[in-house]
Structure formats: structure tokens, C-alpha cells
Image (cartoon, rainbow, N blue to C red):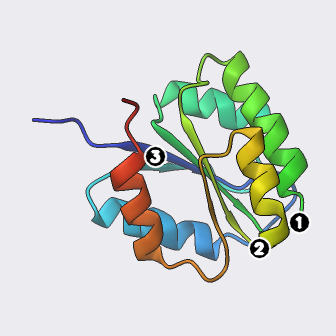
């Protein structure tokens, strides 16, 4: 039997809007994944340490504050420092289309904007969540 995908969902920075993150967690759990939600206002280091502790296959960030580029940069660096560079980083929230390419160039595996559905997120994680 295959172990379920392990997903860590985090709210970095000062953003306090977490309803969307909680809905994503619920949808992923209902799809059979092991999901950990870190709660609000986590630092890049706290997110990376939680990813290592829970052996996350995927780290999902919910960012509504507009700070997705600097936060993603810092979190990717923290993941590498924590030995979690193989975890896939996914960013969702209020992400302007013009920033999608920059996020992907940084190493973000997928970007889900406000028009994405829970089904889109679940399907992507199911298809791409495990490292080859």
C-alpha cells in the first residue's frame, strides 16, 4: 500500500486571511492526503522546519498580501537549507498573472490564482505531488 501524499499548507508573513487555506486543506484531506496546516503568520524558517518535521512532499503557500515573490524566494531558500529542496512548492492566492512566470523561474512548481478551483489544486497535487 502506498503511503498518502504529505502536504504542508502555510500562511507566511503577516497575512491573516486563512479561509481559503483551510478549504484547500479540507479538499486535500478528503482526497486521501495527509495534510498539516501550520496556522497564521509563519516565517520562512518555521515553514521549512515544519516541512522537514512532517516530511512534506508538497508545501503549499496561501498568500493574499501581494508579497508572493519575496516570500517564495525566502521559503525556497529555507527549504533547501532544511534539506527539503526536493519538496514541491505551490503558491496560491491573489497572484497576478504577470507574476506567474517569475514564480516559476524561482522554482515554484505550480501557481493557483483566485480563479482556480479546489479540484484544480487536488488534481495537480495528485498528479505531481510525488518526486519521481
- Disc 1 is placed on an element classified as loop
The answer to whether the residues at label 2 and label 1 have Cβ atoms under 8 Å apart is yes
The answer to whether the residues at label 3 and label 1 have Cβ atoms under 8 Å apart is no
State the residue at coordinates (68%, 27%): 79
The answer to whether the residues at label 3 and label 2 have Cβ atoms under 8 Å apart is no
Between disc 3 and disc 2, whose residue precedes? 3
- Disc 3 is placed on an element classified as strand
Residue at the left extreme, as displayed: 1
Specify the quadrant that holds the N terminus.
Answer: top left
Whole-Å distance between the Cαs marked 3 and 2?
A: 21 Å
100, 82: nearer the viewer = 100
- Disc 2 is placed on an element classified as loop
Between disc 3 and disc 1, whose residue precedes? 3
Relative placement, left or right, of 44 versus 7 is right
Q: Which residue is mark 3?
A: 7
Q: Which mark is residue 94?
A: 2
State the residue at coordinates (76%, 43%): 105
Q: Which residue is mark 1?
A: 66
Q: Position of residue 132 (x, y in %)?
A: 36, 29
State the residue at coordinates (65%, 54%): 39
- Say few, some or many: other residues with alpha carbon within 10 Å of mark 1 (under 14 / 14 to 19 / 20 or more): few
State the residue at coordinates (89%, 58%): 67
Relative placement, left or right, of 94 versus 28 is right
Amino acid at each position: 500500500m502506498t503511503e498518502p501524499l504529505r502536504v504542508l499548507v502555510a500562511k507566511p508573513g503577516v497575512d491573516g486571511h486563512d479561509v481559503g487555506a483551510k478549504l484547500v486543506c479540507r479538499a486535500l484531506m478528503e482526497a486521501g492526503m495527509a495534510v498539516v496546516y501550520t496556522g497564521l503568520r509563519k516565517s520562512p524558517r518555521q515553514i521549512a522546519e515544519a516541512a522537514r518535521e512532517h516530511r512534506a512532499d508538497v508545501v503549499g503557500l496561501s498568500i493574499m498580501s501581494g508579497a508572493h515573490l519575496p516570500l517564495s524566494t525566502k521559503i525556497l531558500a529555507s527549504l533547501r537549507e532544511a534539506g527539503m529542496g526536493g519538496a514541491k512548492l505551490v503558491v496560491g492566492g491573489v497572484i497576478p498573472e504577470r507574476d506567474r512566470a517569475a514564480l516559476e523561474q524561482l522554482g515554484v512548481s505550480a501557481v493557483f490564482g483566485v480563479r482556480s478551483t479546489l479540484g484544480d489544486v487536488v488534481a495537480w497535487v495528485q498528479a505531481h505531488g510525488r518526486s519521481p
